[in-house]
Amino acid sequence: MSRFSRILSQGPDAKTVLTIFLALCLVPSYLTFTVIGTVGRPATLLALGLFAWWLADKLRRHVAVPWPFQPVRWALAAVVIAVLASYAGAMFRGLPGAEISPADTGLLLVAAWCGLCLVTHDGLRTMDDVIIMVRRIVTTGALMAALGLAQFITKTSLLAWISIPGMSGDTAGAIDQRGGFVRAAGTASHPLEYGLVLCAILPLALALALEDRERGVLARWWPAAVIGTAAVLSVSRSALIAAVVAIAVLFVSWSPRVRAAASLIGCGILGLVYVSVPGFAGTLLGMFTGAAGDPSVSSRLNSYDVAFGMASRSPILGRGFGTLLPSYVYLDNEYLGVIVELGLVGLAAVLWFFATGIVCAWGSSRRARTPFQQQLGSAIAAALCASAVSFTFFDALSFPLSAAFTFMLLGLAGAYHRVSSASRGLFVGLDIRPSRDRLEPLLTV
């Protein structure tokens, strides 16, 4: 067999392809291949490829692989069924011309998110695979956080120089401010998306910092320190609330000694920010005490009546995923958007999806064999809690990074649950790489 044939027969594993996806997340989200449109972001195209890869693996298997009940996959199936039912209902009713293309695009986006979730879920076969992917997710978050800190300090996006042939975007030089402070966005398309992605990654970084003893102190702690500082400096109420929720969930799983140390470290970070960034503490306090007069809060509240009016026309299946156009109303509440687009059936499916991932990760962590594995499961559950809370504060599925990381984390929860069960002798994982016995006939032709 030739060298090329051996490479083809082995194929890339899930960790490699998911790492490429994480690297593409560092490409500015506003850059797209213009001729493709909304799905023209490199990370989205790769995620669609992941779905095709996963589906091809299922279709080519000659012998069914025995699988026990997989709660996360069934919860994902419920979300997909809700989306398809809503799409079918919308097409039978008839959609305005402006909504047909967004509805079709919505199906492609759901397929891409499914690819991320399923390849993460099925492709991580051992606990070592899960740990490696968590490390890589945390490293990606740390790089995004470092870029955000540089944006905060320099008050520039630092991305205007990036130019990729065939891709375009119009927000490279944009920089948002609140209370006189720059709202960093990293490579995300909006500061709110950036802050909430960091808050979802933060508990994973803390778990590695506390228990990943295979690495040195600096390698363990610098990502957590950078991500935590960037989350505080994100100048976002929603991000701070999500961070508090994530840490509160982790707090339950920590020992009294770790709780005391974490409290001291947290106070130290807040004190450092207070001293090094004059006026920032007052800005943070003002965001909460002055929320009643904040235009962003008023906009959210004023849009609710419009949203409920639209939802009442099709309360069961909704008007179709992706058909709630920005020209109609800005909701800044993904759950309310789900009610409008997918109806009560879709809302139940999304809530079940989150609840299943959280319960699987948390429940498996209680039966973990080592403190590191226990912390890892608790951190995944905390990350999903932060993501679930963040859906209340902005339309998360309308932003590429927040949607992608949410589905990847849900897939990670399913993988953690599966390999934890396998370690207790219940079942084994699934190798989604092409096996040699299937490719041998093709290679010898």
Image (cartoon, helix red, strand yellow):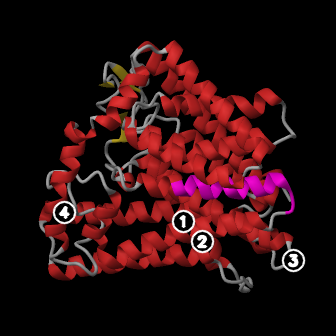
- C-alpha gap between disc 4 and disc 3: 49 Å
Residue drawn at the location 36% of the way across and 74% of the way down = 346
Mark 2 secondary-structure assignment:
helix
Q: Residues within 10 Å of mark 2 (few under 14, many from 20)?
A: few
Q: Is residue 125 left or right of residue 194?
A: right
Disc nearer the start of the sequence (3/1): 1
Name the quadrant of the N terminus: bottom right
Give the residues in magenta: 369-385
Disc nearer the start of the sequence (2/4): 2
Find out whether the residues at labels 2 and 1 contact each other: C-beta distance under 8 Å: yes
- C-alpha gap between disc 2 and disc 3: 28 Å
Find out whether the residues at labels 3 and 1 contact each other: C-beta distance under 8 Å: no
Label placed on residue 307: 4
Mark 3 secondary-structure assignment:
loop
Taking depth in this image into account, of 162 and 137 the one nearest to the observer is 137
Find out whether the residues at labels 2 and 4 contact each other: C-beta distance under 8 Å: no
Residue drawn at the location 23% of the way across and 50% of the way down = 300
Q: Which residue is mark 2?
A: 56
Disc nearer the start of the sequence (4/1): 1
Q: Which residue is mark 3?
A: 425
Percent x, y for residue 251? Answer: 66, 49
Percent x, y for residue 386? Answer: 51, 52
Mark 4 secondary-structure assignment:
helix
Q: Residues within 10 Å of mark 4 (few under 14, many from 20)?
A: many
User: Residue 104 occupies which quadrant of the picture?
Assistant: bottom left
Q: Nearer the viewer, mark 3 or mark 1?
A: 3
Q: Which residue is mark 1?
A: 52
